[in-house]
Amino acid sequence: MALIEVQDLVKRFDGKEVLKGVNVLLSEGQSKVVMGASGCGKSTLLKCLNLLVAPTSGRIIFKGEDITRPGVDIHRLRQDIGFVFQHFALYTHLTVEENITLGLRKIRKMKTAAAREKAAFELERVGMFEHRKKYPAHLSGGQKQRAAIVRALAMDPAVLFLDEPTSALDPQMSREVVTVINKLYLDNITMFCVTHDPFLAKYISDSIVFMHEGVIVAEDIAERLFYEHDDPRIRQFYLSVIDHR
Amino acid sequence: MTFWNILLILVKGAGYTVLVTLASIGAGLAVGLLLAVLSLVRWKTVRLLLAAYTYVFRSIPVLVLLFIVFFGLPGMGIRIPPFFSMVLCLGLVSGAYLAEIFRGAMAAVSRDEITAAEAMGMKRVQIFLYVIWPQMFRMAVPGMTNEFTSILKYTPFAYTVGIPEIMKEAMSLAALTLRGLEIYLAVGILYYLIYKVFVVSFETLEKRFRIPGLAGE
Amino acid sequence: MDAFLQDLIHYSPQILAGLKNTLLLMAVMSIAGLAGGIGVFYLTLGKNRLLRWGTERYISFFIGTPLLVHLFLMYYGLPQLGIRLSAFAVAVIGFTLNVSAYNARYLMTAYNGLDKTQIEAARAQGFRFGQTFRLIILPQTLRLSVPSLTNQVIQNLKDTSVAFLIQYPDFFAQMQEIASTNFQFLKTYVAAGLVYLALVSVIVAAARRLERKTALPGLETLDHA
Ligand SMILES: Nc1ncnc2c1ncn2[C@@H]1O[C@H](COP(=O)(O)OP(=O)(O)OP(=O)(O)O)[C@@H](O)[C@H]1O
Ligand SMILES: [Mg+2]
């Protein structure tokens, strides 16, 4: 069943058309990766889907409901979508544990003890339990991103969005994070992930969507998109990203 | 009497307000720079004295200081005219704050540049004049603007020692006409205008001397 | 015994009453000014342009004009409209409006230095703006502003000395009265200065403690020795 269905999504920033009619489908349990050159509109697409950015036109059907209509409870919607950012975006004044329990307590209205227990369980899964009392400033990049993933997951979202989760990390830390996301993939967590990293893309996706200047030009599984597709834009993109590694 | 008339009468006092402000800024800069340069001395007694100075003049209210100087010192046979009393007090107090600002700005000048200057064989005075001073002055601009604004806002105290600045004019006028509302509103507007002129001229100066990559925080 | 000291002892009930008034005024305006500052800061983050513009003007006006003018405007101006406030009320209102503007400015400066992705993260998590403000923005900006906010308390204490100009019987007002009866102007005013010095020392010590207690990794304030 389709969890998210995007129809002819358009986004203009003061006259500049960034998304030019995007159509994409994400089923429950599916993991999709979005790739494409810098500035082609990937982050904008992701942010439109949880209404962090207001779409200009088009329809976004989430769980069978058009969320672009007026009167939609955007807070409820966002509570159902986990979001992981490139630069972690952990709350500086809270420990790892508090970062995770804040949403559980204030949004899910869980009791502190129950929230802690849940945080502990989730942290254990990504090998971060021992760091739970630390502040973000005392964590490595890889640890921060794992904490951020747990923060999003602990809310039991219907889908997890990740916007370049590894691109602020060095290769070693990047690997830690890929391993974690791969585990989620194997657990059939529904994911929608933007990345430039073909390595990450390959290990966490059922299929890859390729975007170019605000439109989706191809969708395929990693092997075919990377090695067999003959669209020159895709070839060029692929060469540029493997060059960087 | 219209609001306009009131404003015109008060403008007469504005000259004194600006004069007191500018003179106090001058005094404050002199004191502040002197203290900042002295803080480079590694002599312990000097440091202690500097700390004590800062502490005292940042703790005693300007008004109390003014009363000590103007009403108190004559008891020791020291008589300072009203204008100079006011300027002295504001100079001493703002000097303490400005010294901190300058010290912060000096500390922000890159250590490497000083080493480079030393390697070129520059003397300490030269290093200060050619390397530290031009940079610290620019970095200190926002802090200085704040401090100068403070000075402007302390100037109404001058009426307590009889200087015919805006506030004094306003009080005489209010006693005469009993129209405090319009009068003090006009005073507020006048001060705000002076404040704006100060801030804008400072920003213009700052832009004129701005160097890419070097900005006050 | 020294005649001056005897005077001080003789007038000590009056001095203490003044001191009480000074401290009361300082406490009230510090607390109200903090609350007001937070409120004004909240308004500056709002979506409504007109409201934001108004708030900016308010801050700029109070930072750009002398405190004494605000006090005189209310104390000598308002009666013209039939509104007669006590010196204490005028002082509290005037000081609070003033201190709120400054505190809001400090919080805004701290806010500008914040890592804004956290705020986006909070939005993405489904927090309402009020929650984001209370749970994320405020705890961080307050921590970062501790030095400025506590400096403001020192400033508040010093500013209470202005209140006698609208006939509020504060500590300095009492000292002046004593000076005008014993004619020991220098000694009396220096004594007043020393009392302010002592009170500031207490605030400074408390501020240092507060700073140490509230600092968190990643949210330490710059050392301002
Ligand atoms: N709030 C905004 N206002 C104006 N323009 C914006 C805004 N956000 C994004 N844009 C523009 O939209 C375009 C697409 O931005 P977006 O961040 O979606 O790109 P991206 O594909 O995520 O790029 P990257 O790989 O660098 O993250 C860019 O040209 C950007 O400048
Ligand atoms: Mg992006």
Image (cartoon, rainbow, N blue to C red):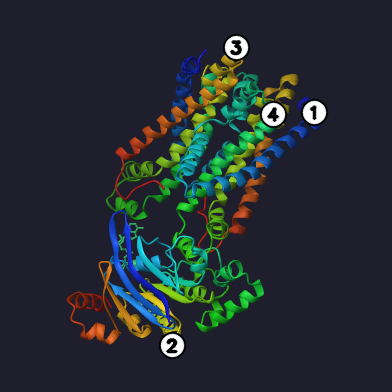
CB-based contact (under 8 Å), mark 2 and mark 3: no
Secondary element at image label 1? loop
Residue A186: image tag: 2
Residue at the disc numbered 4: C87
Residue at the disc numbered 1: C11
Q: CA distance from mark 1 to mark 4?
A: 23 Å
Identity of the residue drawn at 48% across and 18% down: B7
Secondary element at image label 3? helix
Look at label 2 and name its amino acid.
Leu
| Left or right side of B155 for A10 | left
Q: Residues within 10 Å of mark 2 (few under 14, many from 20)?
A: few
Ligand 2 image-quadrant field: bottom left
Camera-nearest residue between A192 and B83: A192
| Left or right side of C51 for C20 | right
Mark 4 belongs to chain: C
Q: Residues within 10 Å of mark 1 (few under 14, many from 20)?
A: some
Horizontal and vertical percent for residue C217? 53, 64
Identity of the residue drawn at 55% across and 21% down: B182
Residue C197: image tag: none
Mark 2 belongs to chain: A
Q: Quadrant of residue C139?
A: bottom right
Q: CA distance from mark 2 to mark 1?
A: 83 Å
CB-based contact (under 8 Å), mark 1 and mark 4: no
Question: In this picture, is A27 found above or below B53?
Answer: below
Residue at the disc numbered 3: B176
Q: CA distance from mark 2 to mark 3?
A: 87 Å
